[in-house]
């Protein structure tokens, strides 16, 4: 167990500032504290709280949007064949389904293409471009990929095929300027005021721009497609602030009673239909099933699920995805165990700040999930590489303070190519260069990561007294939803409570059930994945706890329940 650092964020905020914000916006001090902790300025608090369509930015403000709309409009008018070129994760799947369905509604001659993860890998590839060209495609629109595909876009242009890129990944120094349009709010020359859209968010803005061009009511188009946009936005773990917050808030309301047959079917199979719905429900129940298609099977299965109007087919596809998700979990466990064995055999593991593990024929669709688990377990950046015939394909996850994209940029001489974000990235590498890559990325980590950076922190919004742990306050906090990246569910601290009862629960005693008392108030807590704490903390101990306040729904009753994030024995 790692002794985590507790970072009480409210210590950095003046009491007078909290009072001013509370008075100005007529909100409780605890809400003001939480918003200030998240860096939300006074002028942004009203939009944050209202989550209004009025705060959706004009899509035409995105650089090249006018070019993209014009080229697509011409393609439709001239009956040119269009291909939507997607990606095999949930962001790419939802982007593909959303844009394809909307272009169909405009009368376009359109098809979609998603590369095979194992055979083709991420992004645009020459073979796919050639295949689409032979099928008569005149316009290819990428979604959630393409921003680094300089050579591939030039090849397409030489073939007489125009390419419109819609992407949200970090840009390298050079852009694929042979494209007819490049939509990416992260472009350094793009003044669009919100750069944290998911790939599906950029595709969503494109269809809204096309709606304007075609004289359609944008509110109707927004409401018709926001459910699909919500799935991809949540799954891609982008910040749930700004436009993303509005998209997800509106989408969750629609998904509570889904009208799309495929979404209803997968929610029913996952056992979450007609239950309270939140961003975490999507992230942990729906997204993994959609993701399973691209990880173990064909991502086209998930796209078809989102598009189908046939109830029996929707049920069949949802069950297939559920089966593939179970297979994914089994494969994940196997790779995780093999990764732990490799770590155990490495005598220098403790000295390395970055975990890099490579194994022949690890399933490429699962290594990213395992990398994430190892990253959380050891609190080190982690890259897992699956290699075949001397070439490795890797997927990495990172910790706070270590920008993985920057690290890979530093090591680009050792890599074939790479792409991604600060916290998640992919790479290709010749296995002959793997040792030098491991050495170089760890050398870079030694330069940018201090020993303090290697200790996980628990960010706590503010301390609370036991009197504040009430059902009323738990409901009050729900007004800050949807929660997600950069708008995490608030975490509080309660000091000097006495343990009444503590016990590991669940399969393999993985979880923890805790009952505490302070000033005669008894509080029930649950700690997911915290079963090992039962070995070190006992009845009668005095503890400080870090927790989220939650509402437990059981047999029609509502009670407050604390979700533990950490425990410190006093």
Image (cartoon, grey):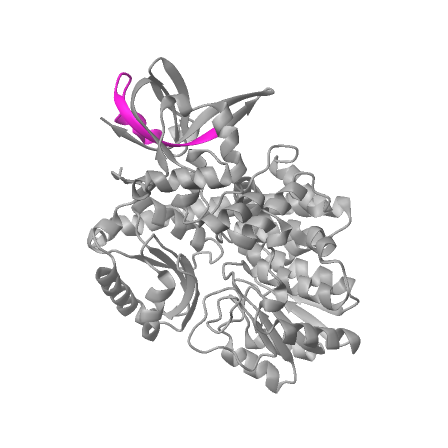
**In the image, 69: left or right of 283?**
right
Residue shown at 29%/45% (left/top)? 456
| Above or below 380: residue 100 | below
Q: Is residue 435 magenta?
A: no
**In the image, 55: left or right of 331?**
right
Nearest the viewer among 508 and 199 is 199
Q: Is residue 545 magenta?
A: yes
| Above or below 379: residue 100 | below
Nearest the viewer among 475 and 52 is 52
Quadrant in which residue 206 is drawn: bottom right
Nearest the viewer among 537 and 127 is 537
**In the image, 450: left or right of 512?**
left
**In the image, 306: left or right of 247?**
right
Quarter the C terminus occupies: top left
Q: Specify whether residue 324 is in view.
A: no
Residue 153 in picture, x, y percent from top left: 56, 79
Q: Residues in magenta? A: 531-550
Quarter the N terminus occupies: top left
Residue shown at 38%/69% (left/top)? 429
């Amino acid at each position: 167990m790692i002794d985590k650092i507790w970072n009480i964020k409210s210590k950095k905020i003046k009491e007078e500032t909290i009072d001013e914000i509370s008075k100005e916006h007529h909100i409780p001090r605890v809400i003001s504290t939480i918003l200030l902790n998240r860096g939300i300025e006074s002028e942004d608090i009203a939009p944050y709280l209202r989550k209004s369509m009025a705060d959706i930015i004009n899509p035409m403000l995105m650089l090249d949007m006018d070019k993209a709309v014009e080229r697509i409009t011409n393609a439709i008018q001239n009956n040119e064949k269009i291909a939507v070129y997607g990606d095999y994760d949930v962001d790419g799947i939802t982007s593909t389904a959303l844009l394809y369905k909307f272009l169909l509604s405009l009368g376009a001659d359109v098809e979609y293409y998603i590369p095979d993860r194992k055979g083709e890998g991420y992004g645009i590839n020459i073979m796919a471009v050639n295949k689409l060209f032979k099928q008569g495609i005149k316009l290819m629109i990428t979604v959630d990929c393409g921003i680094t595909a300089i050579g591939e876009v030039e090849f397409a242009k030489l073939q007489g095929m125009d390419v419109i890129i819609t992407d949200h990944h970090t840009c390298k120094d050079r852009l694929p300027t042979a494209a007819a349009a490049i939509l990416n709010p992260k472009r350094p020359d793009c003044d669009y005021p919100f750069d944290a859209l998911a790939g599906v968010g950029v595709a969503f803005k494109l269809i809204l721009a096309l709606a304007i061009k075609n004289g359609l009511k944008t509110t109707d188009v927004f409401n018709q497609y926001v459910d699909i946009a919500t799935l991809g936005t949540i799954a891609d773990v982008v910040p749930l602030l700004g436009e993303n917050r509005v998209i997800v808030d509106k989408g969750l309301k629609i998904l509570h009673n889904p009208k799309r047959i495929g979404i209803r079917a997968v929610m029913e199979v996952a056992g979450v239909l007609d239950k309270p719905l939140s961003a975490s429900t999507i992230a942990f129940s729906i997204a993994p099933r959609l993701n399973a298609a691209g990880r173990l099977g064909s991502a086209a299965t998930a796209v078809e699920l989102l598009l189908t109007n046939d109830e029996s087919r929707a049920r069949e596809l949802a069950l297939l995805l559920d089966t593939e998700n179970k297979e994914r979990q089994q494969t994940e466990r196997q790779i995780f165990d093999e990764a732990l064995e490799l770590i155990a055999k490495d005598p220098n593991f403790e000295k390395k700040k970055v975990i890099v593990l490579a194994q022949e024929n690890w399933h490429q669709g699962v290594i990213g999930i395992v990398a994430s688990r190892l990253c959380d377990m050891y609190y080190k950046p982690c890259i897992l590489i699956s290699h075949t015939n001397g070439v490795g394909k890797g997927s990495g996850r990172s910790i706070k303070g270590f920008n993985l994209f920057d690290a890979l940029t530093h090591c680009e001489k050792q890599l074939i190519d790479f792409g991604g974000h600060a916290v998640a990235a992919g790479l290709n590498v010749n296995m002959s260069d793997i040792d030098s890559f491991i050495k170089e990325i760890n050398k870079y980590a030694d330069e940018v990561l201090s020993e303090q950076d290697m200790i996980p922190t628990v960010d706590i919004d503010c301390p609370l007294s036991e009197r504040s742990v009430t059902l009323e306050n738990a409901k009050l906090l729900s007004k800050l939803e949807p929660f997600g990246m950069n708008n995490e569910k608030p975490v509080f601290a309660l000091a000097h409570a006495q343990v009444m009862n503590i016990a590991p629960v669940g399969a393999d005693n993985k979880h923890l059930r805790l009952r505490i008392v302070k000033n005669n108030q008894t509080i029930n807590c649950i700690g997911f994945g915290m079963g090992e704490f039962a070995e070190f903390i006992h009845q009668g101990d005095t503890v400080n706890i870090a927790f989220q306040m939650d509402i437990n729904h059981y047999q029609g009753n509502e009670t407050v329940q604390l979700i533990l994030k950490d425990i410190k024995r006093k």
